[in-house]
Image (tube, grey):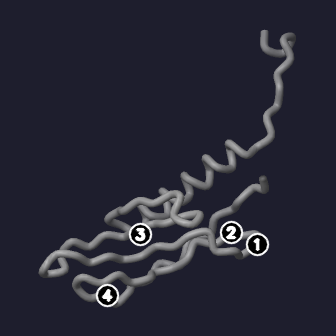
């Protein structure tokens, strides 16, 4: 598996009305420029006061909801960091260097 470098979408607002969902931006792989996820802004509640941002990565395999854009980017960066760590080649330690 190849190393993924995440690029967060630019911070911008979305015009979304009560009970609707608006697309804010796409997470892309900085090297290949392929889309690996997105952020959506969700309004719910009768007055639209329940405002959440949802993050979906790798076809919905990793999904979460947050209050702020910065939390969304931090979650996405954390997911990519864990995936890169798991996919990294393992280096075996010899018994003499472990002491």
Residue under label 1, please give it.
Answer: 32
Q: Position of residue 83 (x, y in %)?
A: 64, 49
Element class at badge 4: loop
Distance between mark 2 and mark 4 Cα atoms: 27 Å
Q: Residue at x 53, y 58 (%)?
A: 61
In the picture shown, does residue 82 fall above or below 57? above
Question: Which marked residue is nearer to the observer: mark 1 or mark 3?
Answer: 1
Residue under label 2, please give it.
Answer: 29
Within 10 Å of disc 2 (Cα), the crowding (few <14, some 14-19, many 20+) is some
Image check: 80 left or right of 51? right
Q: Position of residue 53 (x, y in %)?
A: 37, 70
Residue under label 4, please give it.
Answer: 16
Q: Residue furthest left?
A: 46
Residue under label 3, please give it.
Answer: 69
Question: Which marked residue is nearer to the observer: mark 3 or mark 2?
Answer: 2
Within 10 Å of disc 4 (Cα), the crowding (few <14, some 14-19, many 20+) is some
């Amino acid at each position: 598996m190849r190393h993924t470098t995440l690029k967060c979408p630019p911070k911008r607002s979305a015009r979304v009305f009560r009970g609707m969902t608006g697309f804010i931006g796409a997470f892309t792989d900085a090297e290949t420029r392929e889309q690996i996820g997105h952020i959506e802004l969700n309004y719910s509640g009768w007055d639209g006061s329940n405002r959440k941002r949802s993050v979906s990565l790798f076809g919905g395999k990793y999904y979460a909801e947050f209050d702020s854009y910065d939390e969304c980017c931090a979650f996405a960066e954390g997911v990519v960091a864990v995936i890169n760590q798991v996919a990294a080649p393992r280096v075996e330690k010899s018994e003499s260097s472990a002491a």
